[in-house]
Image (tube, helix red, strand yellow):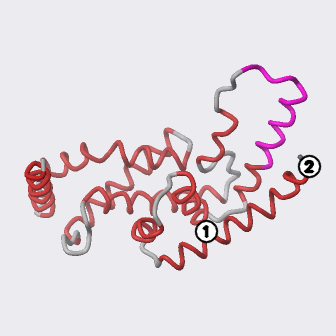
């Protein structure tokens, strides 16, 4: 199994080296091996198939334009490298969309769409709708960067180092952004907790 992993690593390295030289088949293989991961990332933040496809396209355009700068000594592997580009493209998209009225951003907004065990009473349904509305409003006060960091840490359970590597910032910056995000959400949602 270890030899297989080494062979895969050598094969991936060879494909990346070919792509760096402009080989179209190598580009295609890198795309085919990674497009699903980037599409899922993009869709998770955009909540739109069209926007996710746009982010996917932008991510691979940036990756292929910058592939000559890919450094095996700096980047651990191609998927991590392109995932970071995907996060940056998603952040750019969220910043642009913030200027428009955003209805859904981030995984927490899926709370309302989860299947219910049974039909709630009208009273419970009203309470759930109000709670979902308050959670969505609370998420809107977070900056796009805070939303992504909050999501990566608390919903995807990523390590602080992994988040800092992907966003190309220090772990202390990630911690500060997380603390600010949690504080904002707590202040926004505290009245809701008191009502219960």
Looking at the picture, does residue 139 appear above or below residue 169?
above
Q: Position of residue 70 (x, y in %)?
A: 22, 69
**C-alpha separation, residue under disc 1 versus residue under disc 2:** 26 Å
Q: Position of residue 170 (x, y in %)?
A: 46, 79
| Residue 178 numbered tag | 1
Closer to the camera, 188 or 67?
Answer: 188
Residues under numbered marks 1 and 2 in contact, where contact means CB atoms less than 8 Å apart: no
In the image, which is nearer the foreground, mark 1 or mark 2? Answer: 2
The secondary structure type at the circle numbered 2 is: helix
Closer to the camera, 19 or 115?
Answer: 115
Magenta highlight on residue 133 = yes
Which of the marked residues, 1 or 2, is nearer the chain's N terminus?
1
What residue is rendered at 32% in x and 45% in y? 35
| Residue 195 numbered tag | 2
The secondary structure type at the circle numbered 1 is: helix
Looking at the picture, does residue 151 appear above or below residue 110?
below
Q: Position of residue 63 (x, y in %)?
A: 30, 60
Magenta highlight on residue 194 = no
Q: Main secondary structure of the magenta part?
A: helix
What residue is rendered at 63% in x and 40% in y? 110
| Residue 70 numbered tag | none
Instruction: Give the magenta range.
Output: 118-134
Looking at the picture, does residue 117 appear above or below residue 25?
above
């Amino acid at each position: 199994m270890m030899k297989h992993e080494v062979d895969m690593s050598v094969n991936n390295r060879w494909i990346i080296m070919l792509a760096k030289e402009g080989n179209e088949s190598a580009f295609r293989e890198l795309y085919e091996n990674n497009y699903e991961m980037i599409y899922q990332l993009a869709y998770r933040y955009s909540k739109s198939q069209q926007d996710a496809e746009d982010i996917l396209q932008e991510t691979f355009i940036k990756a292929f334009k910058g592939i000559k700068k890919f450094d095996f000594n700096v980047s651990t592997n191609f998927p991590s490298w392109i995932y970071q580009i995907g996060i940056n493209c998603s952040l750019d998209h969220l910043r642009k969309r913030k200027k428009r009225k955003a209805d859904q951003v981030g995984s927490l907004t899926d709370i309302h769409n989860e299947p219910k065990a049974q039909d709630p009473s009208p009273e419970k349904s009203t309470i759930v709708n109000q709670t979902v509305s308050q959670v969505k409003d609370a998420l809107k006060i977070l900056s796009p960067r805070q939303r992504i960091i909050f999501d990566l840490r608390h919903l995807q359970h990523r390590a602080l180092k992994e988040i800092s590597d992907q966003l190309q910032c220090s772990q202390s910056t990630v911690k500060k952004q997380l603390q600010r995000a949690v504080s904002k959400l707590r202040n926004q949602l505290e009245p809701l907790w008191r009502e219960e």
